Image: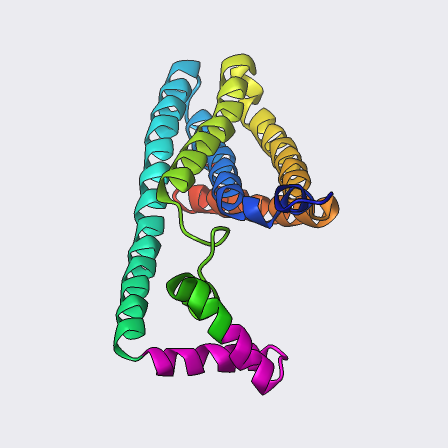
Amino acid sequence: MLTINNYMDNHYIHRSNWLRAAVLGANDGIISISSLAIGVATASAAREPVLLAVIAGLVAGALSMAAGEYVSVSSQTDIEKADIERERQELQDMPEEELRILAEIYERRGLKKETALQVATELTAHDALGTHIRDELGINEISQAKPIQAALASGAAFTFGGVLPLLVVLLAPITYMEYALYAFTILSLVILGIVAARTGGSGVMKAVVRIVVWGTIAMGLSALVGYLFGVNV
């Protein structure tokens, strides 16, 4: 027998919130730390300054990503809570008007007018506020903002992404470090695209091309900025 939990296991939309934060964090970690390492490596003949810059950037970046994600998603949560409270008050003050709005929503979705009114009436009797939150405001368990989850996913993913170029800094010869970082960054972005696509159940090629192209553009712009300021990357 197919249950709701089994049904959701066959779909991936419930992963969208944390997956978005994780992909963003990992992508930012790979590109930011690699760009930082490349910039310092081209200006230094020693490994220690590069290593120090990378570790500092990794710690600061992970904390910044987590804090930024928490603050931004918390703002979304505040808006959702305010709308829910507003909807609760409207249900108390004008229940007939809210019932009419709900029926019109179902009618626009394809139900006949009589059927839409009957569905709205029955759902309102069952759970008026929950029904309006879901169908009028468009807030549900899948789309609802989760600040802690987003912050942890983003911060952890940035750390993981930043550790990859850190390994290159630790192991690659200083003479060829910037070239190793370029190559390893592209490889890491390809792997990230594959993992993100598999986790989200989407097409692998499209995800890989998107993340590699934009990652390469970001690296190229970083190199251009370095060149304009007199650093030959």
Where 131 sits versus 207, above or below?
below
The main secondary structure of the magenta stretch is: helix
Tell me how many marks there are: 0
Nearer-the-camera pick, 40 or 163: 163
What is the x, y in percent for residue 195? 65, 35
What is the x, y in percent for residue 164? 53, 24
What is the x, y in percent for residue 229? 38, 44
Q: Which residues are magenta?
A: 95-120
Give the left or right position of residue 82, taking residue 35 as reference: left
In the orientation shown, which residue stands out farthest toward the bottom? 113
In percent of the image, x 46 and y 76: which residue is there?
102
Q: Does the segment drawn in magenta span residue 153?
A: no
In percent of the image, x 43 and y 69: which residue is there?
124
Where 109 sits versus 218, above or below?
below
**Residue 95's quadrant in the figure?**
bottom left
Give the left or right position of residue 228, taking residue 78 as reference: right
In percent of the image, x 43 and y 38: which residue is there?
154
Where 146 sits versus 152, above or below?
below
Nearer-the-camera pick, 155 or 230: 155
Give the left or right position of residue 146, taking residue 107 as reference: left
Q: Quadrant where the N terminus lies?
A: top right
What is the x, y in percent for residue 56? 34, 25
Give the left or right position of residue 158, taking residue 204 as reference: left
**Residue 215's quadrant in the figure?**
top right
Where 148 sits versus 210, above or below?
above
In percent of the image, x 60 and y 77: which residue is there?
109
